[in-house]
Amino acid sequence: MNKEEVAKLLERYSAGLCTKAEMTLVESWHLKELSKQNSDVDQAELTDAREKIWLAIQQETNIKAGKSKMLWLKIAAAAVVLFVIGIVIKREVQKDVQSENLVNQIHQKVIHPGGNKATLTLGDGSKISLTDASNGVIAKQAGINITKTKNGELIYTVATASAGKKDLYNTIETPRGGQYQINLPDGTKVWLNAESSLRYPAAFDQTKRLVELKGEAYFEVAKRLDKKGKRVPFKVKTELGAGRNQEVEVLGTHFNINAYRNEPSNKTTLLEGSVRIKNLQSNKVGLLKPGQQSSISSLSPLVFISEADAEEAVAWKEGFFSFNEENLTTIMNKIARWYDVEIDYRGNKINKNFGGRISRFNSVNEVLDMLQTTGAVHFKIEGRRILVMP
């Protein structure tokens, strides 16, 4: 039977003009085609469809025996086809739902990004939540006014001529899911990334400028001259122990320091000027030029220097995650700190590097989506925990 003959047969069937043999043929043809084209519909369901429909038809025919058997045969054939189509539709809908659930597993809960959050500890030990504090002057100490701006910045300004005579240190700390910008008393600008802290004097003296960092920060160091017109160096000390204590000395420059305890090394990336890196365990020294990055780890007493993508190193400051052939552990550490989530690895270790760029102000779900499109890793969110699976 060719396509044209099938079309004519179906027209006669719709008009009720088929013979009994033709009606049986239409019914069997529909069932056969449906069962072939939809492998998700098993034979048991098809058989069950026939039995239920024919049972209902037989009962109805017994009650109304005077009606035309031809009419009931037509109804029976149509009912069987509709029943099976119903099964097919149901199974397809279930399959679509299951597929959607698999694709959207990581969307069980939207986890939003971090923001401007920090705590300031003053020299007398008192603490101020910068997250909750009103804009304006929030503290005064040693002749210095400390002001919070509406843009999430902390600014130190000299209020009296006697400023800086007291040896007071302040500490600003960002939690997981926090970041903050601070303008130090000498005019140096510092951007703190999540889960970081910076300890600094409320007022710098005329001979030295020393701050202590844990975590990650980007510095734009202000030039400062002493009474003799000589530049006053600016030093950043990081003490993590285990062979990872370092000191960065600069005169006036832009650079980024990444020094988290759960990372394998300290990395200092220079964007402008020049810096001197000292490994405090071995006293080995390295000099950085713009576009270079130093690395200090517990595996070696040396200061390793290599070419680096400076823009990638400070992408976090501009509001982006930027991954350039980066391993999954390092990426998930960044995600954990910024979104304040726990990471749980399941199954075999994923030995693959990833690349990509996405806004840090997207939800964590969108960031995970980007990584998941590679097919090398899958994620599931349970509360504030992210499961990482091959």
Image: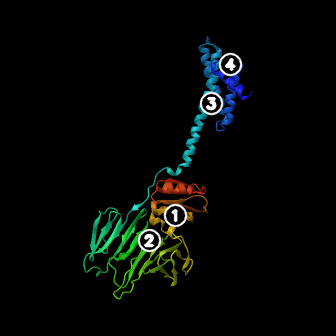
- Label 4 to label 2: alpha-carbon separation: 83 Å
Q: Which mark is residue 322?
A: 1
- Label 2 to label 1: alpha-carbon separation: 16 Å
Q: Is residue 379 visible?
A: yes
Residue type at numbered disc 2: Tyr
Q: Position of residue 51 (x, y in %)?
A: 64, 26
Mark 1 or 3, nearer chain start: 3
Up-down relation of residue 273 to residue 178 (above or below): below
Q: Position of residue 295 (x, y in %)?
A: 53, 76
- Label 1 to label 4: alpha-carbon separation: 69 Å
Name the residue carrying label 4.
18
Assign the C terminus to one quadrant of the image. Answer: bottom right
Mark 3 or 2, nearer chain start: 3
Mark 3 or 4, nearer chain start: 4
Instruction: Indicate the secondary structure of the residue bearing disc 4.
Output: loop
Name the residue carrying label 3.
84
Mark 2 or 1, nearer chain start: 2
Mark 4 or 2, nearer chain start: 4
- Please state which of residues 80 and 290 is positioned toward the viewer in this rendering: 290
Residue type at numbered disc 1: Ser
Name the residue carrying label 2.
218
> Along the horizontal axis of the image, is 147 left or right of 18?
left
Up-down relation of residue 368 to residue 237 (above or below): above
- Please state which of residues 168 and 158 is positioned toward the viewer in this rendering: 158
Q: Residue at x 53, y 70 (%)?
A: 309
